[in-house]
Amino acid sequence: MNTPLLQIEDLHVHFPLAGRKQACVRAVNGVSFHVEKGETLGLVGESGCGKTTTGRAVLRLIEPTAGQIFFEDVDVRALGKKELRQFRSQMQIVFQDPYASLNPRLRVGDALVEAMEIHKIGSPSRRPALAQELLERVGLNPDYAKRYPHEFSGGQRQRIGIARALAVNPKLIVCDEPVSALDVSVQAQVVNLLMDLQEELGLSYLFIAHDLSVVKHICHRVAVMYLGRIVEIATVDDLYANPKHPYTQALLSAIPIPDPTQRQAFVPLAGELPSPLNPPLGCAFHTRCAYAKAECREQQPQLQAVAPGHSVACHQVGQCLAKEGRAQCYSYYDLVCDELC
Amino acid sequence: MQSVLSSKTALFGLILLGIVVVSALLAPLLAPHDPREQNLEKRLQPPAWMQGGSPEHPLGTDHLGRDILSRIIYGARVSLLVAVISVAVSGTIGTLLGLAAGYWGGRFDAVVTMLADVQLAFPFILLALAVMSVLGTGLRNVILVLGVTGWVVYTRLIRAEVLALREKEYIEAVRALGQKDHKIIWRHILPNVLPSVIVMASLRIANMIIAESSLTFMGLGVEPHIPTWGNMLADGREYITNAWWLATFPGLAIMLTVLAINLLGDWLRDRLDPRLQNSL
């Protein structure tokens, strides 16, 4: 098997709290995954589960507390300040808020030229022309290079953000909820643009999102995060057709079905996301899980393969599989899934 | 190009400031009298349009019989010089410290913030008194004291703005591109805080003109024989009930100069904002 483009091992990001010595927020608490070349890995979960922090930590925009990040054969965490700056052209980021992600006092063309300047792409005299090509590539008029960000709509700004990321010829782009701030019609355009670019340039994406329909459309594989951990990871078809983890099932059941004659069995999640300052012992999800047993409160489940390329971190799933070869305790949920698919 | 001529208020400010600057530059040509020439026979003469006034002294004379108009014209030199240079010095120091403290945070930020608090707790006059008594009085030392002690307001303002800007996604984006810190500050943060610096500087010019007056009034500032708006105000204070023109005209000069600078400052702030360029 080829080495993956990006390999994350046991990544931790803890934020110390001012004033309290021992206390810290465990935003990311032992996350491992990999991204293949040309692949889109979705990272989903509710607000506050650590998906954005994971994306930032992969780029070392936030320094990870522990864990390893390998990009091809580069140990990203071992890079010095200067090496890291040079390495940054390999991995780029597209942000959620198109209104905050462009400097209001910099012309669009200048922002793109700046990106090329940093990594010495093209000759200084050619860069403005290259910037115009980039704008064309993301579906904008090349003359827009002379304009300021406030002259554009949200969707256009997001395209500019993508052009800026592309300016340094990255291999991987972390997309941090790139469409969640856009209108639905514009969302589709931007998602399709990302998919076209992936095909043309062989890009890989780490696609952070909470909109599961978008994820289903763009991603090849999906990792579901809950409270700083990955609870389930599978190919997109497998995950949507056959979700194993109770949390994944609850998430999927929350997708609205655009058909009023079809009622869906909504699996409600009781309670709130526990505080990452003080995560529950054992399985972090046990406080909201209908199937929690004694061991769930005591022992932390590890990710284990239930099918090729499909891993789940759940004691109950593991047991049922061992007994019956199928998660029989989820019969109710299986019904939900049948309806969903 | 957006011209200053298209904004009426900015044009008004420009004309006013132009008059002050021209008076300062061409004082010997414009002033009808030597500002230091005393004539005790004509002391406390009212302005020309009042009873007892004479066209020889359009704005009257002071308690030593010196021509007030001439003194105001000459006083513009000192006031402008002190205000502009001390604002430039304190604005530069303050902005640089604020940028660095806000961007890097940590120990440097803690030290700068502490120094700022110490200086704010220390009465300005007391500090000026201490410095001036060590350095001695004189125009250069007034500028030095005002320039070096004025940084705090800029630092606090800029630091707070940088703290907010630093978290913006476009700053994160250039960090993700691998840009060097000093270039991020120079290209992305400074242009976004500059409007605040300009507004603050235009307000501070007024403070500096008044601070110079206070120091001069206490005998710690400019040498008493140099006419300044500050020592004219100070002199006029004693005669305010029976000869109002002594303090009123220099006060008016200060007010109009400050107004002119503020109007221009507002225009410049809007001019620097690309979002407002088409709407102006």
Image: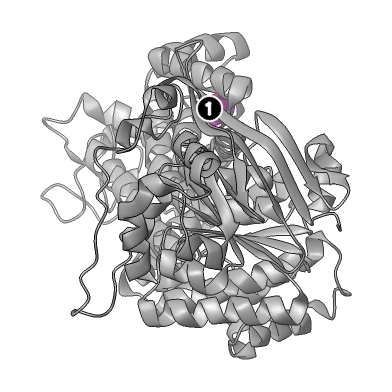
Q: Please, what secondary structure does the residue beneath circle 1 have?
A: strand
Choose between A37 and A169: the one closer to the eye.
A37
Choose between A20 and B216: the one closer to the eye.
A20
State yes or no: residue B58 in magenta.
no
Instruction: Name the residue at 42% across, 54% down.
Output: B32
Q: Residue B105 location in percent, x, y? A: 58, 29
User: Relative to residue A165, is residue B149 depicted above or below?
Assistant: above
Specify the farthest residue to the front.
A324
Q: Chain of mark 1?
A: A
| Mark 1 nearby-residue class (10 Å; few <14, some 14–19, many ≥20) | some
Colouring of the image = one colour
Q: Amino acid at mark 1?
A: Phe
State yes or no: residue B145 in magenta.
yes
Q: Residue B136 location in percent, x, y? A: 59, 14
Instruction: Name the residue at 49% across, 69% down.
Output: A216
User: Relative to residue B208, is residue A192 depicted above or below?
Assistant: below
User: Relative to residue B159, is residue A113 depicted above or below?
Assistant: below
Can see residue B19?
Answer: no
User: Relative to residue B279, is residue B145 depicted above or below?
Assistant: above
Q: Looking at the figure, which quarter contains the C terminus of chain A?
A: bottom left
Q: Quadrant of residue B101?
A: top right
Q: What main secondary structure does the magenta stretch of the protein show?
A: helix
Choose between B155 and B268: the one closer to the eye.
B155
Q: Looking at the figure, which quarter contains the N terminus of chain A?
A: bottom right
Instruction: Name the residue at 37% across, 77% down.
Output: A184
Where does label 1 land, which residue?
Answer: A15
Choose between B268 and A28: the one closer to the eye.
A28
Range of residues picked out in magenta: B143-150
Left/right placement of residue A57 relative to residue B121 reads right
Left/right placement of residue A327 relative to residue A91 reads left
Can see residue A319?
Answer: yes
